[in-house]
Image (cartoon, rainbow, N blue to C red):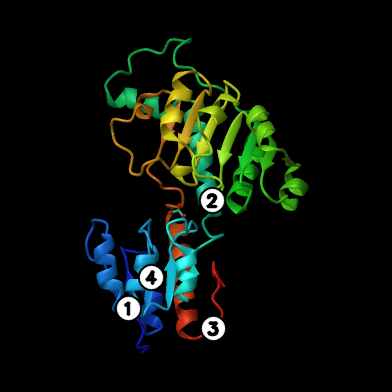
Amino acid sequence: MSEKLVFITSRIPQIGLELLDKAGIFYRQWPHERKITKEELIENVKECNILLNIGSNQLDEAFFKACPKLELVSLLSVGYDHVNIGAANQYRVPVTNTPGVLSKATADTAFLLMLASSRKALFQYKKILDGKWQKNVPTDILGIELHDRTLGVFGLGRIGLEMAKLCKGAYNMDIIYHNRNRNAEAEEILGAKWVNFEDLLKQSDVLSVHSQLSKETEGLFNYDVFSKMKKTSIFINTSRGAVHNEEDLIRALQDGKIWGAGLDVTNPEPMTADSPLLTMPTVAILPHIGSATVETRDEMARLAVQNIIAKINNEFLLTCINP
Ligand code: DGY
């Protein structure tokens, strides 16, 4: 048995707990369905050596300062915009995440939202729920097709690459992308073309955001940016809601600057039920379920716990953000 104690901020797939048990690692788990508050998180973690964090709990400087026993933060997510990495470094706490294992599931979600927006699928579904499925008129509530169109990927990393593969394979879409670095794999296997940001906006029929949230990307997709996109285009965001300005997105859709949107992430999150976005036929929204499949969540839990076991055994961390 290890004398290290792990705190887990919510329920996790059983495989994660089994791995901890098998390794003889003690853990405490937040027992409530509601999200843990900042104060409760500190109260619990200050007694522990390792935090297994699920979701967007803000791990800021005050948190690291208040938890002197902390030796590792293992995130059950690929995104780490909620962690102050500078403070983690200052307090010498390594932070690990779960990249790779969720790329396909998250790309599937982007693809699903793209289709749902293009065919007004959620709006049509709501019609049935509202008892408004009466007759089909050939000119009513038409969608648009995506075959042979252009997919623009903003942030072509692992998830963006999977989305590009889906769009190429299913719809023979041309792939353009904007990134700090060129992606040789995408260029080679998909014929993807790097373009500057302005060209990405001008040329994309579907623009899918897969970048991290950072100072450079926060609020980047605003009214001005939407105004430069094609009026027939669809904006997809499965990364972080704060990359787009939601008021501006609403206005851009109302003014016909773009045709539709598919969001797995909103700004703020959770979104309120009175958002005008929820009544727009060409908008499809999901409640941040990008990686939510049985297979992927198992793999995320496995990887997060493997990092914990590695830390306890003084071994190399598999996916450390701040080595
Ligand atoms: C991730 O893994 O970053 C997902 O968006 C969940 O937060």
Mark 3 vs mark 4: in front: 4
Query: Which residue position is annotated with label 2?
Result: 212
Cβ of mark 1 under 8 Å from ligand 1: the answer is no
The crowding category of the residue bearing disc 3, from other C-alpha atoms within 10 Å (few below 14, some 14 to 19, many at least 20), is: few
Residue 316 % position (x, y): 56, 79
Measure how far apart labels 3 and 4 are at the Cα level.
23 Å
Q: Amino acid at mark 3?
A: Glu
Q: Nearer the N terminus, badge 2 or badge 1?
A: 1
Residue found 47% across the figure and 34% down from its top: 262
Q: Are marks 1 and 4 in contact (CB under 8 Å)?
A: no
Res. 240 visible in picture: yes
Query: Which residue position is annotated with label 3?
Result: 315
Q: Amino acid at mark 1?
A: Cys
Query: Which residue position is annotated with label 1?
Result: 48
Q: Nearer the N terminus, badge 3 or badge 4?
A: 4
Measure how far apart labels 1 and 4 are at the Cα level.
12 Å
Residue found 35% across the figure and 44% down from its top: 269
Res. 149 visible in picture: no
Q: Nearer the N terminus, badge 4 or badge 2?
A: 4
Tell me: 55 left or right of 78: left
Q: Amino acid at mark 2?
A: Gln
Residue found 44% across the figure and 69% down from its top: 74
The crowding category of the residue bearing disc 4, from other C-alpha atoms within 10 Å (few below 14, some 14 to 19, many at least 20), is: many
Mark 3 vs mark 1: in front: 1
